[in-house]
């Protein structure tokens, strides 16, 4: 009986979840591109965006990234510019094949709260490649786009 309990404990522990899911961990953003309506890729967050994607063994995802070259400011215009140069999302996450789906519970973009955001991914060594589904561009109003993000495992 103790043996069965031990096996159940090991199989259900967060360490086991971490081993079985290669997405679990901390990932540093190294590249961000936006492709809008058959245009050339744009680096809306600059060539050196800053940010992290964190996925816990319990199934929680948090991502925040910002554009390079941001300027601080307290006035309305400066704060609006800061808002346009960031992304922040958190929610539960599940994996379906080569996609992960975020059930958004808090976001910098209120219209995402309560939605499911699907992302296609692949892992090559210590790099994580993520592509968003096409949708309204949150930075360029009236345009449909998709994003390509590249992360590397933070060690």
Image (cartoon, rainbow, N blue to C red):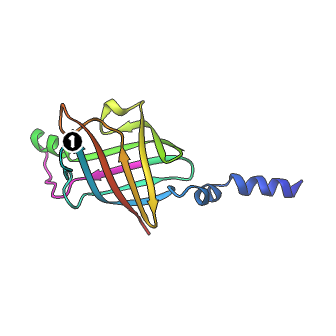
Q: Position of residue 105 (x, y in %)?
A: 43, 35
| Residue 71 shown in magenta | yes
Q: Nearer the viewer, residue 40 or 24?
A: 40
The residue drawn where x is 84% and y is 54% is 4
55 relative to 75, above or below: below
The residue drawn where x is 13% and y is 45% is 74
Crowding at dot 1, Cα within 10 Å, few <14 / some 14-19 / many 20+, comes out as few
Q: Position of residue 151 (x, y in %)?
A: 37, 59
Q: Which residue is mark 1?
A: 38
Q: Nearer the viewer, residue 124 or 13?
A: 124
Q: Position of residue 110 (x, y in %)?
A: 32, 32
The residue drawn where x is 74% and y is 54% is 9
Left or right: 95 as drawn, with respect to 154: right
Left or right: 33 as drawn, with respect to 12: left
| Image quadrant assignment for residue 80 | top left
Q: Is the magenta region chiefly helix, strand or loop?
A: loop
Q: From the image, which quarter does the C terminus lie in? A: bottom left
Q: Nearer the viewer, residue 131 or 24?
A: 131
Left or right: 129 as drawn, with respect to 41: right
Where are the magenta residues, as a range? 62-74
């Amino acid at each position: 009986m103790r043996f069965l309990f031990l096996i159940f404990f090991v199989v259900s522990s967060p360490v086991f979840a971490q081993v079985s899911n290669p997405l679990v961990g901390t990932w540093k953003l190294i590249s961000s591109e936006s492709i809008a309506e058959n245009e050339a890729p744009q680096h809306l967050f600059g060539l050196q965006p800053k940010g992290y994607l964190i996925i816990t063994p319990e199934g929680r995802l948090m991502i925040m990234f910002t554009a390079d070259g941001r300027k601080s400011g307290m006035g309305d215009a400066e704060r609006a510019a800061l808002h346009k140069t960031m992304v922040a999302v958190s929610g539960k996450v599940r994996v379906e094949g080569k996609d992960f789906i975020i059930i958004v519970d808090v976001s910098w973009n209120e219209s995402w709260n309560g939605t499911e955001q699907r992302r296609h991914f692949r892992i090559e060594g210590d790099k994580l490649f993520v592509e968003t589904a096409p949708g309204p561009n949150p930075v360029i109003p009236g345009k449909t786009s998709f994003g390509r993000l590249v992360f590397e495992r933070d060690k």
